[in-house]
Image (spheres, rainbow, N blue to C red):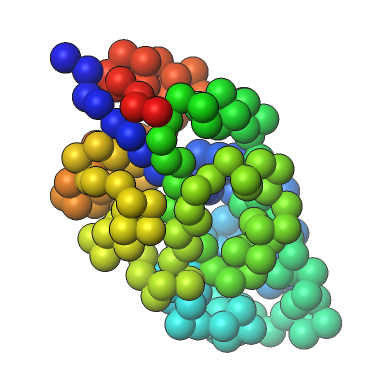
Amino acid sequence: MKRKISAILFDLGGVLTRPQDPECVRELMDWLGLDGEVERFKAAYFAHRDEYDRGTLGVEEYWRAVAADIGAAPAAAGLPRAIERDLDAWMQYRPGMLEVLTALRPRIRRLGLLSNINFEGARRLRSSFPRLELFDQLTLSCELGLMKPEPGIFASCLRSLGAEPSESLFVDDSVANVEGARAAGLYSFRFIDEEQFTAELATFYELLA
C-alpha cells in the first residue's frame, strides 16, 4: 500500500542544486594558498560550517577560522570574491528538478524547502532561485538557529506548513538528515538523481492535493 502524503519538503544543496562545484573549490583553494590539497581544504572548510549555517558565526569570522585552520593568510582584498564563489559553488540549479517541482505543484497540498544555509546563501537563494513561488514555506537554518538533523527544525517547518509528520515526505542527499527526518516522524529517502526521485515517489507514495 502506498503512503499517503500531503507535503513534500526538499533539501536545497545536492537536491535542487548540484553538488559543490569543483572549479569554485579550486578558486577558493588558490585564494587560501593551497596547491591541490583538497582534503586539507575540506577539513578546514567543513570544521566551522555548522556554526556558519546556524547563523552563530559571521561570514568574515568563518573565513578567518578556515584560514587559521590551514595556517594561511589570504589577501583581505580577495574576501568578497571568495564569498561570491562559495555561493556559486552551491547554487547551480538542476533544470530537471525545477521541472519536477513545477509538475508536482498542482498535485500536492504543500511544498517546502528545508535547508542548512547561511545568511549569504539565504539572500542568494531568495534573489536567484528560478521558481521560488512554488514553495509554500522556506525553512532556513540560519534564520532559526537550528540545523538538520535536529528534530526542532523539522517541527518548525511542519508547523509553518500546517502539515503533519505522518503525511509528510522529506528528501535530502544526506543519510544523517534522512535519518533525522524519520526520527521526527516523517517519511524520508535519500536523493540520488531526478530519475531515482521520480521512480521512488511514483512507486511508494500517493500524493494528496
Question: 4 or 48, which is in the foreground?
Answer: 4
Residue found farthest to the right: 77
- Reply above or below: 193 against 76: above
Q: Image quadrant for the N terminus?
A: top left
Question: 11 or 110, which is in the foreground?
Answer: 110
206 relative to 53 in the view: left or right: left
- What x and y, as percent, mark residue 204? 27, 19
Q: Image quadrant for the C terminus?
A: top left
- What x and y, as percent, mark residue 158? 32, 53
Can residue 30 be seen here? The reply is no
Name which quarter of the figure residue 37 lies in: bottom right
120 relative to 188 in the view: left or right: right
Q: At 53% across and 45% down in the image, what residue appears?
A: 135
- What x and y, as percent, mark residue 120? 64, 69
- What x and y, as percent, mark residue 53? 48, 69
Name which quarter of the figure residue 16 lies in: top right
Number of residue marks: 0
Q: At 41% across and 72% down in the image, what residue appears?
A: 144
155 relative to 88 in the view: left or right: left
Q: At 33% across and 34% down in the image, what residue appears?
A: 6
Q: At 25% across and 26% down in the image, what residue appears?
A: 4
- Reply above or below: 201 against 23: above
Can residue 186 be seen here? The reply is yes
